[in-house]
Amino acid sequence: MGFLMFALFGLVIGALARFIMPGRDPGGVFVTAIIGMVGSMLGAFLGRAMGMYTYNTQAAGWVMSLIGAVVLLGIYRLATGHRLAT
């Protein structure tokens, strides 16, 4: 049940990240969920590095998860060579 909630959270965060950074991306729902989940982990790592969270905290929270997903989406677009919306 925990992984299912994490996947659902990742899907929501990934969709919000794509809404913030409009443009065409391949991959659909699966890639959106992966970007959201990994972005959430990246947000937790960055939050811990900045002293916002303790190491006992598992979740990064909505804001840091979204920041992590936006950063990861930007890296994904650079790596795949997709252009930003103009």
Image: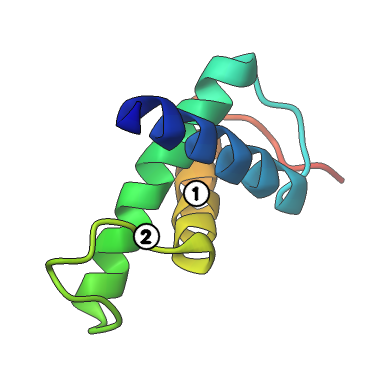
Q: Are marks 1 and 2 in contact (CB under 8 Å)?
A: yes
The residue drawn where x is 71% and y is 49% is: 21
Residue 23 on image: x %, y %: 77, 36
Residue 43 on image: x %, y %: 37, 60
- Using the rendered image of the protein, determine whether residue 78 is visible from the camera's viewpoint: no
Q: Name the residue tied to disc 2.
A: 43
Report which quarter residue 56 is drawn in.
bottom left
Is 72 situated left or right of 42 in this image? right
- What colouring does the structure picture have? rainbow
- Under circle 2, the secondary element is helix
Q: Name the residue tied to disc 1.
A: 69
Kind of residue sitting beneath label 1: Ala
- Using the rendered image of the protein, determine whether residue 63 is visible from the camera's viewpoint: yes
Is 73 situated left or right of 17 in this image? left
The residue drawn where x is 51% and y is 28% is: 33
Kind of residue sitting beneath label 2: Gly
